[in-house]
Amino acid sequence: MDQDMEQTEVIAANDRFYAAIRSGDFATMDALWSARDVVSVYHPNWPGITGREEVMASWHDVLVLAEPPEIFPKEVTVIRTERMAFVLCVEEVGGARMTASNVFVKEAGGWRLTCHHARPLPVGAESKKSR
């Protein structure tokens, strides 16, 4: 598979991740995370969470027990190796902007998340798209 196609697949997986958040689709969120590798999540203002069961429980709380946020990835940059991809972006949530890193691994069936880390941008900080 050529590099452009691989990059397109990573971006599509990243887009599915944010669509699952917006729609509160826990089943899709569960399918997006690796069942093979160690996974972790760093929700804004939460302690880090490691382990698939714990990570999925946190997403259940965010997607099912609370109002799913209207969140959109902007300024997306992909850094990819043969088996891993790092997606760096700015998340727009309501009027707030956060930075996020999403780490994907290539598994049978496509790209799966192993880590999501989001944090608020400092007040007054503006992100700059890489050149």
Image (cartoon, rainbow, N blue to C red):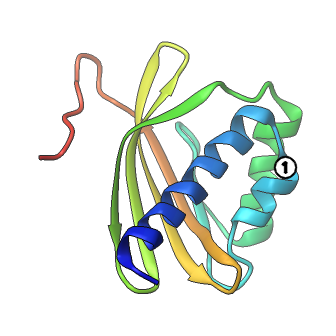
Q: Mark 1 packing: few (<14 Cα in 10 Å), some, or many (20+)?
A: some
Nearest the eye: 77 or 67: 77
For image coordinates 71% across by 80% down, the residue present is 109
For image coordinates 71% across by 63% down, the residue present is 32
Does residue 127 appear left or right of residue 27 in this picture? left
For image coordinates 40% across by 80% down, the residue present is 2
Give the residue number, with chain letter if any, for mark 1.
26
Residue 17: x and y in percent read 64, 50
For image coordinates 57% across by 44% down, the residue present is 43
Residue 110: x and y in percent read 64, 76
Does residue 3 appear left or right of residue 36 in this picture? left
Residue 7: x and y in percent read 42, 66
> With respect to residue 94, does 61 lie above or below?
below
The picture quadrant where one finds residue 66 is: top right
Nearest the eye: 38 or 71: 71
Note whether residue 88 is visible. Answer: yes
> With respect to residue 26, does 53 lie above or below?
below
- The amino acid on which the numbered mark 1 sits, given as a three-letter code, is Phe
Q: Secondary structure at mark 1?
A: helix
Does residue 119 appear left or right of residue 116 in this picture? left
The residue furthest left is 131
Does residue 65 appear left or right of residue 80 in this picture? right
The picture quadrant where one finds residue 68 is: top right
Note whether residue 48 is visible. Answer: no
Q: In this figure, what is the number of numbered marks? A: 1
